[in-house]
Image (cartoon, rainbow, N blue to C red):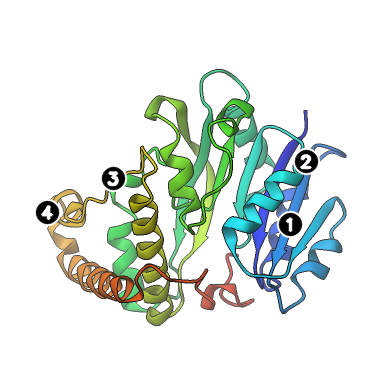
């Protein structure tokens, strides 16, 4: 049984190599089919990916995550299938555990436990994620990790990724709570922005993408609980009130910017965590 990994990569030369070597570090020959879709790249992403044995590279001229995921999906042949962000690192055992979780009848989709790397970040970034990391919406969800595994039956739930950047929220919408699993023994370290401006840029993109997906008419998409940061996180932990104020202020600013954009936000992402010194270690 071959597990297929689809990685959409836009100018990810600063982080992709380390992630690929972790993925394949202990892999057996033919165990994984790794497809990197370099889309709209102006750096050495494609060349770097080709230099890693066992990695197949597709190149698309235009930047766009949905198109990249669909191209990689069309080229993939194996199941289970793992959709992985280029800046998220999983080791070989983590990929195996995710594949095993969806290989039986118990679950159609699985995601790792997310671990937020906030070391060395400015105060506002750390304050935001002190609240964000405790939001109950992420428990048992498929989004917010950058890594989702699906079984063959799970993949049959949809035709193509929609033309929105909220691909993980879309995958989450396809499965009932009993059909998806969060693996507490598999960590997925997510690098947080190293600058507050980069955090705000990321929040605008996420807010606009999530709103566009919810307005698309796709059923099952989780609704936003805007007061959850206060009701579920800060009120039970009053010492987080200053962090909550930072969280609320940044969320309001991001919401206003997303509305001004009219939902037309490119695959904007945090560049600060993609430099050699800013990437997950």
Q: Marks 3 and 4, how far apart in space?
A: 14 Å
Q: Is residue 153 left or right of residue 240?
A: right
Q: Is residue 121 left or right of residue 249?
A: right
Q: Nearer the viewer, residue 181 or 173?
A: 173
- Sequence-first tag of 2 and 3: 2
Q: Residues within 10 Å of mark 2 (few under 14, many from 20)?
A: many
- Sequence-first tag of 3 and 4: 3
Q: Marks 4 and 1, how far apart in space?
A: 44 Å
Where's residue 21, x and y in %? 76, 56
Q: Are marks 2 and 3 in contact (CB under 8 Å)?
A: no
Q: Secondary structure at mark 1?
A: strand
- Residue pointed to by mark 4: 235
- Residue pointed to by mark 2: 32
- Sequence-first tag of 2 and 4: 2
> In this rendering, which labeled residue sits more in front, label 3 or label 4?
3
Q: Marks 2 and 1, how far apart in space?
A: 13 Å
Where's residue 129, x and y in %? 34, 63
Query: Could you say which quadrant of the image residue 29 lies in?
Result: top right
Of the 4 image quadrants, the one containing the C terminus is bottom right
Q: Are marks 3 and 4 in contact (CB under 8 Å)?
A: no
Residue at the spot x=12%, y=58% of the render?
238
Residue at the spot x=70%, y=52% of the render?
71
Q: Is residue 280 left or right of residue 60?
A: left
Query: Could you say which quadrant of the image residue 177 lies in?
Result: top left
- Residue pointed to by mark 3: 136
Q: Nearer the viewer, residue 12 or 267?
A: 267
Q: Is residue 88 left or right of residue 222?
A: right
């Amino acid at each position: 049984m071959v597990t297929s990994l689809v990685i959409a990569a836009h100018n990810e030369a600063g982080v992709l190599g380390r992630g690929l070597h972790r993925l394949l570090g202990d892999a057996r020959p033919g165990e994984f089919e790794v497809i990197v879709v370099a889309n709209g790249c102006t750096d050495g992403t494609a060349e770097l990916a080709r230099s890693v044995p066992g990695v197949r590279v597709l190149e698309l001229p235009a930047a766009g995550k949905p198109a990249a995921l669909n191209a990689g999906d069309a080229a993939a042949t194996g199941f289970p299938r793992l959709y992985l962000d280029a800046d998220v690192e999983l080791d070989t055992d983590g990929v195996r555990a995710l594949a095993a979780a969806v290989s039986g009848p118990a679950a159609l989709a699985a995601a790792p436990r997310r671990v937020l790397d906030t070391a060395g970040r400015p105060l506002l970034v750390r304050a935001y994620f002190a609240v964000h990391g405790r939001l109950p919406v992420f428990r048992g969800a498929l989004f917010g990790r950058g890594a989702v595994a699906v079984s063959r039956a799970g993949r049959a739930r949809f035709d193509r990724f929609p033309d929105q950047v909220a691909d993980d929220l879309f995958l989450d919408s396809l499965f009932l709570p009993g059909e998806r699993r969060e693996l507490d023994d598999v960590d997925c370290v997510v690098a947080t922005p190293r600058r507050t401006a980069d955090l705000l840029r990321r929040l605008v993109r996420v807010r606009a993408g999530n709103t566009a997906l919810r307005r698309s008419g796709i059923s099952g998409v989780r609704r936003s609980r805007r007061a959850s940061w206060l009701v579920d996180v800060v009120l039970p932990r009053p010492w987080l009130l200053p962090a909550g104020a930072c969280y609320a202020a940044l969320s309001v600013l991001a919401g206003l910017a997303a509305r001004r954009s009219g939902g037309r936000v490119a695959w904007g992402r945090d560049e600060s965590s993609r430099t050699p010194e800013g990437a997950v270690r």
